[in-house]
Image (cartoon, rainbow, N blue to C red):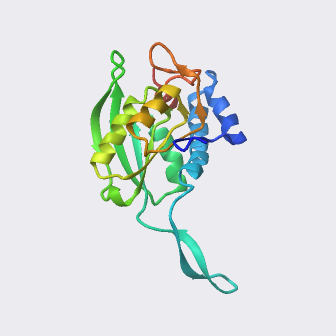
């Protein structure tokens, strides 16, 4: 079993992923289904959250009931496409703190360029989940995690919709302590660094831009 990579192969996740891979799926439907898939993925990426108990009164009696422990977790969207995952996860965990890492890919070099960074305080005391639909070359993911670690994060996970083997390996080499959770591990990168078969540019399809 790969301790670094988790592929969420739930039938509903895979069915919905097929719908948004389809190039005929319109923007509004793409956005809605991505929202739905992100909630399934959120269940998996938060599976090992620390727990404690507190005393409550049910209508019948008192009990020690399970509840989340520690500081609120932090969700960090890698702009702009990360916002497509952020909305669904935040709906599930509305108390989470939110941060943003602004990176864009230089299409000539395939290297990420940073333009924005704003994250919650106390990252070292929080579970930090970085969000980006596509883990392609892994360069942007690597830089985003670098920045989060520099800001104090020590307990990190990376959540994506589709990953390429090249991106997974890049993350494994650079950040072996950061588990990757995804809905699919696709075949490869193509000659321009896009995931194949993939689903195209997640940001463009989500926001209706070209």
Q: In the image, is residue 91 above or below residue 18? A: below
* Number of disc labels: 0
Q: Quadrant of residue 32?
A: top right
Which sits in the foreground, 128 or 5? 5
Instruction: Judge left or right: residue 94 versus residue 63.
Output: left
Q: Locate the C terminus by quadrant.
A: top left
Q: Quadrant of residue 18?
A: top right
Residue extending farthest to the top is: 191
Residue extending farthest to the bottom is: 61
Residue extending farthest to the right is: 11
Instruction: Judge left or right: residue 70 versus residue 62.
Output: left
Residue 71, how many percent across, how many down?
A: 40, 64
Residue 101, how many percent across, how many down?
A: 34, 40
Q: In the image, is residue 130 above or below residue 46? A: above
Can I make out residue 157 in this image? yes
Which sits in the foreground, 106 or 208? 106
Q: In the image, is residue 69 above or below residue 8? A: below
Please tell me which residue is depicted at 70% across the width and 85% down the height of the picture. 60
Please tell me which residue is depicted at 30% across the width and 52% down the height of the picture. 152
Q: Locate the N terminus by quadrant.
A: top right
Residue 85, how many percent across, how many down?
A: 50, 42
Please tell me which residue is depicted at 38% across the width and 29% down the height of the picture. 139
Residue 20, how many percent across, how many down?
A: 62, 30
Q: In the image, is residue 86 above or below residue 49? A: above
Can I make out residue 80 in this image? no
């Amino acid at each position: 079993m790969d301790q670094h990579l988790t592929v969420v192969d739930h039938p509903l996740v895979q069915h919905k992923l097929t719908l948004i891979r389809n190039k005929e799926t319109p923007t509004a439907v793409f956005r809605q289904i991505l929202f739905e898939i992100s909630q399934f993925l959120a269940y998996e990426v938060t599976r090992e959250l620390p727990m404690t108990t507190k005393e409550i009164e049910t209508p019948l009696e008192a009990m020690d009931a399970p509840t989340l422990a520690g500081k609120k977790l932090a969700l960090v969207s890698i702009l702009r496409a990360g916002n497509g995952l952020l909305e669904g996860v935040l709906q599930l965990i509305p108390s989470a703190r939110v941060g943003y890492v602004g990176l864009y890919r230089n299409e000539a070099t395939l290297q990420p360029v940073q333009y924005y960074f704003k994250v919650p305080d106390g990252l070292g005391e929080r579970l930090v989940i970085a969000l980006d639909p596509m883990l392609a070359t892994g360069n942007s993911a690597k830089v985003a995690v670098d920045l989060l670690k520099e800001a104090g994060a020590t307990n990190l996970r990376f959540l994506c919709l589709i990953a390429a083997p090249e991106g997974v390996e890049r993350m494994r080499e650079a950040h072996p302590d950061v588990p990757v959770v995804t809905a699919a591990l696709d075949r490869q990168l193509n000659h321009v660094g896009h995931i194949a078969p993939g689903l195209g540019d997640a940001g463009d399809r989500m926001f209706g831009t070209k």
